[in-house]
Image: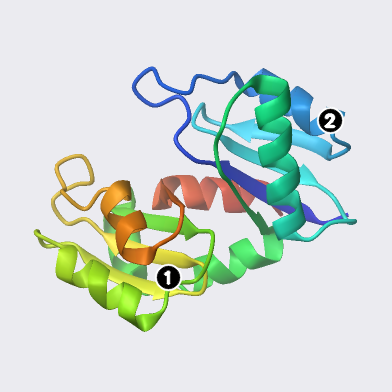
């Protein structure tokens, strides 16, 4: 069976969109996904399935979350192989080794075009650096993510698609669990 990683957008942040990981793991089982696990409290799931594409899994999980948990949110699903490729493609590997909490991978519903990337680069007000590959963008926040004006709202507006981010520490932990 193929291992998949599912990321929820904007859950358990600042008291909003509260969802228990036990409820999410139960939901995975109820919709027929195997070996459901979670990492941290911010909507990081691992599970197995061999019958659906990642897009089909996103639709299934978004629908199940709405119907079973009363929560409207986006899911971003990648197979373990896609995750490994995404990690290897990180153009900021030196920064990720030095300051993993300041490197963010932004998972996107659709790949941005070159005009979208240019729009995001124009929107940057600080020292952040962006690179996009496929349905991911990699961002270095040299002064820290919390102080930056380069927020998820700015990223989604520039790219014209829904997004969620995970810092490099979390990306590595999920990658290790997905093997």
Residue 28 at what x, y percent from top left?
78, 33
Query: Which of the pair 142/7 is nearer the observer?
Result: 7
Disc 1: which residue: 90
Q: Quadrant of the C terminus?
A: bottom right
**As drawn, is 112 to the left or to the right of 30?**
left
Whichever of labels 1 and 2 marks the residue nearer the N terminus, that label is: 2
Tag shown at residue 29: 2
Element at label 1 = loop
Residue visible at 69% across and 59% down? 80
Taking 105 as reference, is 93 above or below it? below
Element at label 2 = helix
Q: Quadrant of the N terminus?
A: bottom right
Circle 2 crowding by C-alpha within 10 Å: few under 14, some 14–19, many from 20:
few
Q: Is residue 167 visible?
A: yes
Residue visible at 84% across and 30% down? 29
Residue 12 at what x, y percent from top left?
45, 24
Residue 79 at what x, y percent from top left?
70, 59
Circle 1 crowding by C-alpha within 10 Å: few under 14, some 14–19, many from 20:
many
Q: Is residue 97 visible?
A: no
């Amino acid at each position: 069976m193929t291992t998949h990683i599912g990321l929820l957008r904007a859950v358990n942040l600042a008291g909003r969109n509260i969802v228990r990981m036990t409820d999410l793991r139960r939901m995975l089982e109820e919709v027929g996904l195997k070996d459901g696990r979670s990492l941290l409290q911010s909507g990081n799931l691992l599970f197995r399935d061999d019958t659906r594409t990642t897009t089909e899994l996103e639709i299934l999980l978004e629908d199940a979350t709405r119907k079973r948990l009363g929560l409207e949110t986006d899911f971003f699903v990648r197979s373990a192989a896609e995750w490994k490729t995404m990690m290897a493609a990180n153009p900021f590997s030196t920064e990720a080794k030095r300051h993993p909490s300041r490197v963010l991978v932004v998972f996107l519903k659709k790949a941005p075009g070159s005009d979208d990337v240019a729009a995001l680069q124009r929107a940057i007000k600080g020292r952040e650096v962006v690179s996009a590959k496929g349905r991911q963008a990699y961002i270095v926040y040299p002064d820290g993510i919390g102080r930056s004006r380069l927020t998820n709202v700015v990223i989604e507006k520039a790219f014209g698609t829904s997004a969620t981010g995970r810092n490099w520490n979390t990306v590595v932990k999920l990658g290790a669990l997905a093997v």
